[in-house]
Amino acid sequence: MLITTTRSDHLCGMKKISILCILIFTLIFPAGGCFDLKDAYTLADATTVDDISYCIKKDNDSESVVICSWWDGEATEIVYEIPDTFEGRDVVWLGDKASGFDIRQPSEYVFYDPDDGMIHQRYEDEPIADVSDESLEITDINVTFVLGENIEYIGTVGPSYLATGDKEDLSVYRVNLFFEISDDNPVYYSRDGVPYLRSNDEPVCTT
């Protein structure tokens, strides 16, 4: 059997290939900046001390990146003191530029999904709570980052909500962020718990 194709078939095929290429390009180079996926830091690369996880900076092994901190599932007033140095390396980033900074919870059986603003439980098809629901009891957690003079980059910090328990016995927590930055830091300063850039006195978006 002879199969023939028309010019429109070829154009359709080319269109599909173009769309696929655009989708792949968008995933690798998202809006707001370009980065290579290999630039992301993971817990497999990290050393954790006093509930803070550090990685050696990929392009400079004399510097460190703080990628996440660990919440115990109970505390509502938390202070994370980020040292100027860790294991002899200057600590220069709070969060990596590919994926930001995470506040990790003891278990991810229940978790907040920022894409839909819902609390989910693993193996459940539907969300188990909506954080915008006024009837939902939410406890505030105040998280303060104390940063030294070497921090030259502050990334986004997430998630905005934490959760423990399950859908039958759920506890939801809202994360409020505060920053205290050393007066000797040449890049940032803090005022009323908010980080600002010294270069233009603009507040830094951390969420």
Image (tube, rainbow, N blue to C red):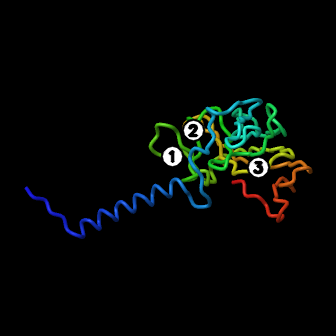
Secondary structure beneath dot 1 equals loop
Eye-nearest disc, 3 or 1:
3
Lower position in the chain sequence, tag 3 or tag 2 = 2
Q: Which mark is residue 179?
A: none
Mark 1, residues whose alpha carbon is within 10 Å: few (<14), some, or many (≥20)?
Answer: some
Secondary structure beneath dot 3 equals strand
Lower position in the chain sequence, tag 3 or tag 1 = 1
What type is the residue that disc 1 sits on? Pro
Viewer-proximal residue among 117 and 185: 185
The image shows residue 123 at horizontal and vertical percentages of 46, 37
- Measure the C-alpha gap from mark 3 to mark 2: 22 Å
Mark 2, residues whose alpha carbon is within 10 Å: few (<14), some, or many (≥20)?
Answer: many
Viewer-proximal residue among 51 and 169: 51
Instruction: Locate residue 48 relative to residue 5 in the image: left or right.
Output: right
Image quarter of the C terminus: bottom right
- Residue occupied by mark 2: 110
Identify the residue at image location x=63%, y=54%: 134
Count how many numbered circles sit on residues in the image: 3
The image shows residue 106 at horizontal and vertical percentages of 65, 32
Viewer-proximal residue among 24 and 77: 24
Q: Quadrant of residue 95?
A: top right
What type is the residue that disc 2 sits on? Val
Secondary structure beneath dot 2 equals strand
Image quarter of the N terminus: bottom left
- Residue occupied by mark 3: 177
Q: Which mark is residue 127?
A: 1
What type is the residue that disc 3 sits on? Leu
- Measure the C-alpha gap from mark 3 to mark 1: 25 Å
Instruction: Check if mark 3's residue and mark 1's residue have beta carbons within 8 Å.
Output: no
Q: Quadrant of residue 42?
A: top right
